[in-house]
Image (cartoon, helix red, strand yellow):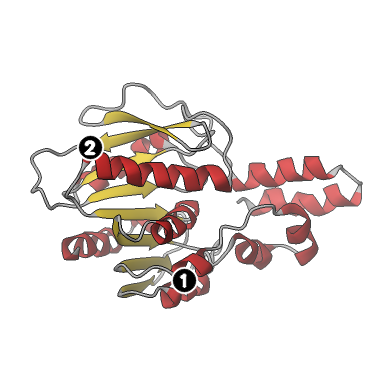
Amino acid sequence: MRPKIWKGFALVLGIGVPLFMLDAFARSALYPAPSVPVPSPPPPSLEEVRLDLSTGETVVGWARAAPSLPPDAPVVLFFHGNGENLQTMNWAGMFEDLEQLGVAYLAVDYPGYGRSSGKPSEEGLMATGDAAVAWARRQHSGRPVVLCGWSLGAATVIPTAARHPEDVRGLIALSPWTSLKDVASHHFPAFLVKALLRERYDSLEAARRIRVPALVIHGDLDDLIPAAQGKLVAEALAGPKKWVSLPGAGHNDLFARPEVWREIEAFLRSI
């Protein structure tokens, strides 16, 4: 979500634009998929994975099989933020950072992102989470499955973990919100939120059903998703959990902090 886009909605409502156009504006703010092309094949050491969703769409991911790892090393399923795709992750050095964790992993694009088909939606992102878990159970039988997501990705992995209590062994939620309505209401008037939002992404409700070990990290200066929302999500988790409020960190600079990667590495070792 981009605040400068949402601020224009008040004017749009004032001149009587049809509701379907308002919905289109809201969706573009929630799902600003970058126009950066995602190449095929992926960079060396990564392999392309295609996941068929229950919605009929197909999403593309990049995976590291890591056959030399111990058989009990985790497989991490990573879900990025709303303004990213696999190639922007690559440019930012995210795959090198994931490589340093010593795990197998899969990072996926959402429907409508990169070379994935369809359009993004809450239903499509939930189906992506389900398909990624099924892939991990097929391709990495015996390895513990850990879900990891940032921002919109956290809103994807939290309910995915709740839906798969027998398949998921750990959860990492980075900069999570309590619900889409809550985070939108932090920035915009209630009448705009009520008029524009059609999706829920209720992380707080899902967190209450999660009993696996969890790590929640949030920058205490996050001006997009307040750290107080991340703390509420952490407190709602029903299993063992660690809450990390990172001093001086905001939203988009979270992964630049080495403490984040140290916390993730330590958590994965504990699984």
Image coords of residue 81 (percent x, y): 47, 48
Judge left or right: residue 66 versus residue 10. left
Judging depth in this view, the residue of 75 and 130 nearest the camera is 130
Judging depth in this view, the residue of 180 and 218 nearest the camera is 180
Query: Can residue 208 be seen from the camera position used here?
Result: yes
Q: Which residue is mark 2?
A: 64
Judging depth in this view, the residue of 243 and 164 nearest the camera is 164
- Quadrant showing the C terminus: bottom left
Say which residue appears at 33% left-offset and 67% top-offset.
215
- Residue found at the far bottom of this picture: 235
Structural crowding at the residue carrying mark 1, measured as other residues with C-alpha within 10 Å and reported as few (<14), some (14–19) or many (≥20): many
Image coords of residue 212 (percent x, y): 31, 67
Judge left or right: residue 165 versus residue 119. left
Image coords of residue 130 (percent x, y): 41, 46
Q: Amino acid at mark 1?
A: Val
Say which residue appears at 54% left-offset and 37% top-offset.
33
Say which residue appears at 64% left-offset and 46% top-offset.
29
User: For residue 87, which numbered disc appears in the image?
Assistant: none
Q: Amino acid at mark 2?
A: Arg
- Residue found at the far right of this picture: 15
Judge left or right: residue 46 versus residue 181. left
Structural crowding at the residue carrying mark 2, measured as other residues with C-alpha within 10 Å and reported as few (<14), some (14–19) or many (≥20): many
Please tell me in which quadrant of the rendered image residue 118 appears: top right
